[in-house]
Amino acid sequence: MNDQAFTFQTLHPDTIMDALFEQGIRVDSGLTPLNSYENRVYQFQDEDRQRFVVKFYRPQRWSVEQIQEEHQFSLDLLADEVPVAAPLKFNHQTLLTHQGFYFAVFPSLGGRQFEADNIDQMEWVARYLGRIHQTGNKNRFIARPTIGIQEYLLEPRQLFETATLIPAGLKAAFLAATDGLINAVISRWDENVKMLRLHGDCHAGNILWRDGPLFVDLDDARMGPAIQDLWMLLNGDKAEQRMQLETIIEAYEEFTPFDSDEIALIEPLRAMRFVYYLAWLIRRWDDPAFPRNFPWLTGEDYWRNQISTFVEQVKVLQEPPLQLTPMY
């Protein structure tokens, strides 16, 4: 796959329309782009006035086997009556191809934004996360990766060494802050934690609300600890997060037991997300969509703020982890 395909410069509207036509879908509306930087995702309506979403996967990111595992997990969840956006089958296949691009078609399932500060909604989401992990425990990913130090910290650190986006005058300070954060995470990371199939990126933006939660975008599904799908729901100060976490775990355990030792992984996972996110931005910088949507990456102030964020996170990692209220 050439570089132009990697950055989607060869993915034209006619290419998309032809790909859908090959599957028997006649687009009767324009292609409305949806918010996605990693892939290219469009909503459309067919001649029967049914709405769909088509997702073109970024070349060179996932292998065929990895995408198929994502699709199978979605279908497993759907079979277990978990409300999730799962790909449709065409001639018994969910993963389709056209001119070197892999793509999938989904039903368009609208909804409003999940309210992260709504305790009732949070309880409902937590119950379904318990069910997602119940399904996730039934099998394992073989091709998709596992959350860990190598992918989330060490590989990004190597990338930072040669990254031209990081201002030369700040490179040494940034690398030192990165090393300090990596060491702090390693000291807190538990290599023996139980791993299961996860949504992987379960923040509020990937949850819609339509008479209950609807989980979308399993593109980052992978093996990892259960707490990975819970901690991104937390917000506010420590007291608020403690109350939210207690609510989440109580609802979650209606379907799946939770190992409270995993709470100590919240801040390490947050730190890993900081580092991994920066590496992702650097890796995608050749895609014209990234300089257009993240112009501040070329400014020194942004990287100074990242250094401060890393230094502050080290201090957080040195503090005792979040503690639940003791039960008597």
Image (tube, grey):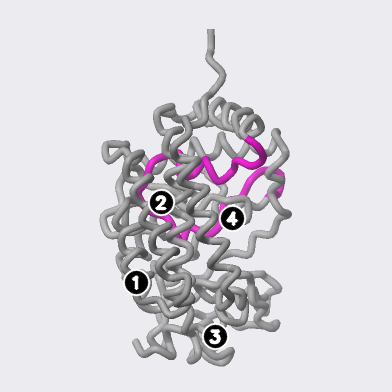
Q: Nearer the viewer, mark 3 or mark 1?
A: 1
Mark 2: amino acid = Leu
Mark 4: amino acid = Asn
Q: Which residues are magenta?
A: 209-237
- Given residues 179 and 158, the one toward you in this image is 179
Q: Nearer the viewer, mark 2 or mark 4?
A: 2
Helix or strand or loop: what does disc 4 sit on?
helix
Q: Nearer the viewer, mark 4 or mark 3?
A: 3
CA–CA distance in space, label 2 to label 4: 28 Å
Mark 1: amino acid = Glu
Please state if 284 lies on the left or on the right of 203 as rendered: left
Name the magenta segment's main secondary structure: loop
CA–CA distance in space, label 4 to label 1: 32 Å
Helix or strand or loop: what does disc 3 sit on?
loop
Q: Position of residue 118 (x, y in %)?
A: 72, 38
Please state if 137 lies on the left or on the right of 215 as rendered: left
> How crowded is the residue under tag 4: few (<14 C-alpha within 10 Å), some, or many (20+)?
some
Helix or strand or loop: what does disc 2 sit on?
helix
The residue drawn where x is 53% and y is 44% is 82
Mark 3: amino acid = Pro
**Tag on residue 161?**
1
- Mark 2 lies on residue: 181
Q: Position of residue 142 (x, y in %)?
A: 26, 55
